[in-house]
Image (cartoon, helix red, strand yellow):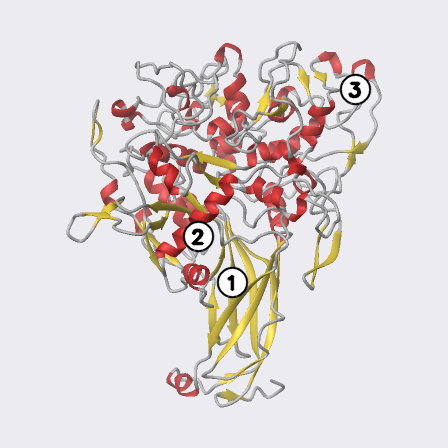
Amino acid sequence: MSLANRSATLVIVGVLLSSMGVVAAQTPVGNPDDPVSSMQPQTLQRPENCLPCHQRQYDELHTAVKSGYRNVSPLFNALETASNFLNGGLLRPVYSDTAGRTQTNGQPLTSNMTTTPLFTDLNQVRAGFCLTCHNQPFIALGDGNLKYREVPALAGIGANFRPDLLRPLRDYHLIDVNGNQVLPTNPGGPPPPGSKPSLGAAGITCETCHNTTGPDMERSFHGDGYANASMLVQGTIDKVGPFQNPVTPQNFFHTASHDPSRIAYLRSGAFCNSCHDVRVPLASGGSLTAAEASTQLGVNGVSFYRLENLSTEWALGPYNSTNNPFNQVVRCQDCHMSSFPYAGNSTYTVNGQTITSPTPGIFPQDYAAVPGVSTEYNYPLQKRNVVTHYLTGVDVPLLPLSELQARLGATYPDPNSTAIDGHGFPAGVAQRRQDLLKAAVRLDLSQSDTTATPGQTFTVRVVATALTGHRFPAGFSQERTTYINLKVTDATGFVVYQSGYVVDKPHPDTGEMAPDGNLNDEDLEHINAVVDPGRYNTTYVTGQGPTANGHTNQVFVLGPDDGPDSRVFEGRNEGLVLFRNELTRVFLPGSQIGRNDANGNPITVLSGAHFEETFSASFANAVDNFRSLAPLRPTLYKYDITLPSQPELAEMGIAGLQGPLTISASVNYEHFPPLFMRFLSRTTGPNGPAGHDLGLLNENTIDTLLVNLPNLTSNTAKVTLTGAGVVSSGGSN
């Protein structure tokens, strides 16, 4: 494979994506220069304060992983803390005002992101690179005089960084009965007895959406209102909902906005776009110099890469137009806040392929608030089309219910609940995730060869079609991976070919010394990752920083089912078909890749470009989007399969193949690839750069909580066998 050719392709796509403007149909509604509201200020409200009037919405949102769970998630916290060990400290400062501001130690603040007065001290965001978007209203509005309290000054700055004092961010999201912050005894340990979740633990809440006034053009890198929580949030009693002429709430707890531009923004795809692209800065303060950043993607002025491109994918895709099977714009809300996928099916054709899938854009009829409780003067409410607040996605909590309730309150719902809600829909997030994913993709085998001969090659042709509003899967697939499991068997069940399979193995690096009979914790056989032990030096000197640079990258080794690279970049019809968006580190000529050769000398890129897959988003500078499926674009994948000849069958003690052959294809989903989870387990474990266990992940977590989903969709086909090496099946071949 040509690394230079592959890198060049990545560069071109990076430039195109980085230079794209906003599609006209999705230009955000509203004016970021609108005057500040004159409404009465109101501090950030706990979700429980909205519950009396909005019980249904509270119950639905409570199950969503972005509301509460995300901030205590072991993986979210592990990614946050792992990023602090690139080059011995914080990877990238975020959203700080660079105009003369200083840190508490007197050092100047540096940032290559947009200027905003939200932060006056880099310590406020040291471990909060992800938190600043996942919990943006809390960071922006705070809780009265407790503003910023929960974002810790994580163990110093730069050379004064103290990894031995490091805690995961979720430790700071606990308060006692008096509202005072309390910490677990050990980093990442169980919450102290009697503690409860802080306001900051609630994550994306009612206030996140209903306090918004419009897009924040200044916060977004392109000035387009996309990515990184680029929304204007006001802390007042004036809340926005989706309806014109809203009714006055009981006791005037808040007002209901009549502003048509605010209402239109909340109802549009542009509202979702403000968060569901993720753009990561490349330059000053991180692993690249400004000069490297400008040349890394081939143009000057591109100072970020697209970690997640979901909203841009939707904006440029068929669902943000009428050029789709439903002949209307299908917004994000039409799948993630509707009756989808429980409102019946539609049948249509895509490039001649007949597809049946759930119908988007159908909403349940209900009250927008609790009748007799929620309106001033007991003004009567009417039933109308309402949005659901499940915000169903592809993740489920990776914490046991007991820990979820200890960290997020005793009423936190069981993710595996089999309960049915008032609309007749599943209430448990695990079931909703499974149903959503089953609606996401279809397979077709009808173009495969219909005859085959032992000793010769025949071709299986799998057509995969994504039915999602964005690419499938979305995000970076070190988090989310889907793949085709293909198997060809004869009539006796003898396997003549397989791809997309796992093997039960030990994992001694995280304490599993023998196979455990569990395949959910096994990786696909296309790649193996080897830890670089030289990056885990735990000796630190105060005032001098660590003696090693923390983790940089894993060493990746191709496995027996190594299809992706050869398929994508060499056009070979072999090996695994993997749908993913790969985190990639591109090294320019003259760069050192962070490892030594066999003689102990640093490996330097001499010419062309060198790329590596990486598990760490903080170490990446590009994302390879070529392997995920584009929506409504049937994609053909070929497998050239050579059957064993008659002599080869005889060597195996097999008289011959018995026809017909059966081709079985299915799409399987990995919640988190185990390799990725074990990387985070090592990085935050007792032998990681912090020098102590952060209490987030271990082998038991992976073995007991990681549940992958096989057979999202499937298809089969028959192949007639002819020629020598075929034995009679006693019936029709």
| Residue that mark 2 sits on | 9
* Residue tagged 3: 247
- Amino acid of disc 2: Thr
- Residue 407 is situated, as x and y percent measured from the top left of the image, at 49, 28
Q: Secondary structure at mark 2?
A: helix
Q: Secondary structure at mark 1?
A: strand
Q: Please identify, in this view, whether the residue under mark 1 or under mark 2 is nearer the observer.
A: 2
For the C terminus, give its image quadrant.
bottom right
* Numbered disc in front, either 3 or 2: 2
The answer to whether residue 582 is seen in the rendering is: no
Three-letter amino acid code of the residue under disc 3: Val
List x then y, in percent, for residue 4. 36, 54
For the image shown, how many numbered marks are present on the structure? 3
Give neighbour class at mark 3: few <14, some 14-19, many 20+ (Cα, 10 Å): some
Q: Residue 179: x, y in percent?
A: 50, 14
Camera-side residue of 164 and 598: 598
Of pointers 1 and 2, the one earlier in the residue sequence: 2
| 619 sits left or right of 483 in the view | left
Q: Rounded to the nearest whole Å, what is the CA distance between mark 3 and mark 1?
A: 53 Å
> Residue at the spot x=61%, y=51% of the render?
631
Q: Amino acid at mark 1?
A: Asn
Counting other residues with Cα less than 10 Å from the Cα at mark 2, is it few (<14), some (14-19), or many (20 or more)? some
| Residue at 30% in and 17% down | 107
User: Residue tagged by mark 1?
Assistant: 485
- Against 616, residue 252 (above or below) is above
The local secondary structure at tag 3 comes to loop
One can see residue 109 in this view: yes
Instruction: Give the mark, 3 or 1, whose residue is nearer the N terminus.
Output: 3
Kindly identify the residue that appears in the image at 35 percent across and 50 percent down: 611
